[in-house]
Image (cartoon, helix red, strand yellow):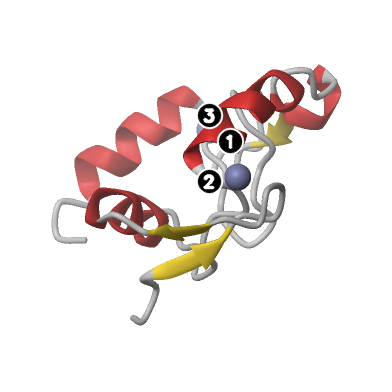
Amino acid sequence: MSLEYYTCRNCGCENKLIDAHRNFLEEHGCSQPPFYCSICFSQRLGEIWEIPSEKRIAACSICGVETRLPFVPCLSRPVYCPQCFKIQNATNDEL
Ligand SMILES: [Zn+2]
Ligand SMILES: [Zn+2]
């Protein structure tokens, strides 16, 4: 991985990607650097949380039940309802 520096899409400043952040992105299967620097990101959080709630509802990949997410689901990633998420975490020890 060569994700080390990225340019903020809002203010254009160059930022170093800290290890914790990189690990977070990798854990979530994202290979792209963040769009925004931490300052712009926190400013835009207000907008992100105003996403209509119907866009944050996705069907669980396992049981198909509709679940409300605190984020907009990533299309390439499976979505789990809280119950299946617990089961997944319990059975995927070796991941
Ligand atoms: Zn910025
Ligand atoms: Zn489920």
Can you tell which of label 3 and label 1 is closer to the viewer?
1
Q: Position of residue 93 (x, y in %)?
A: 15, 51
Residue 47, quarter of the rendered image: top right
Beta carbon of the mark 1 residue lies under 8 A of ligand 1? yes
Residue visible at 42% across and 24% down? 83
SS class, disc 3: loop
> Ligand 1 lies in which image quarter?
top right
Q: CA distance from mark 2 to mark 3?
A: 31 Å
Residue at the far bottom: name it: 2
Q: Position of residue 89 (x, y in %)?
A: 27, 40
Q: CA distance from mark 3 to mark 1?
A: 27 Å
How dense is the environment of label 3, judged by Cα within 10 Å: few (below 14), some, or many (20 and up)?
many
Check whether the beta carbons of the residues at disc 2 and disc 1 lie within 8 A of each other.
Answer: yes
Query: In this orientation, does residue 32 appear?
Result: yes
Three-letter amino acid code at the position of disc 1: Phe
Residue visible at 33% across and 81% down? 1
Check whether the beta carbons of the residues at disc 3 and disc 1 lie within 8 A of each other.
Answer: no
Q: Which residue is mark 1?
A: 41
Q: Which residue is mark 3?
A: 81
Beta carbon of the mark 2 residue lies under 8 A of ligand 1? yes
Checking the image for residue 63, the label placed there is none
Residue 26, quarter of the rendered image: bottom left
Three-letter amino acid code at the position of disc 2: Cys
Check whether the beta carbons of the residues at disc 2 and disc 3 lie within 8 A of each other.
Answer: no
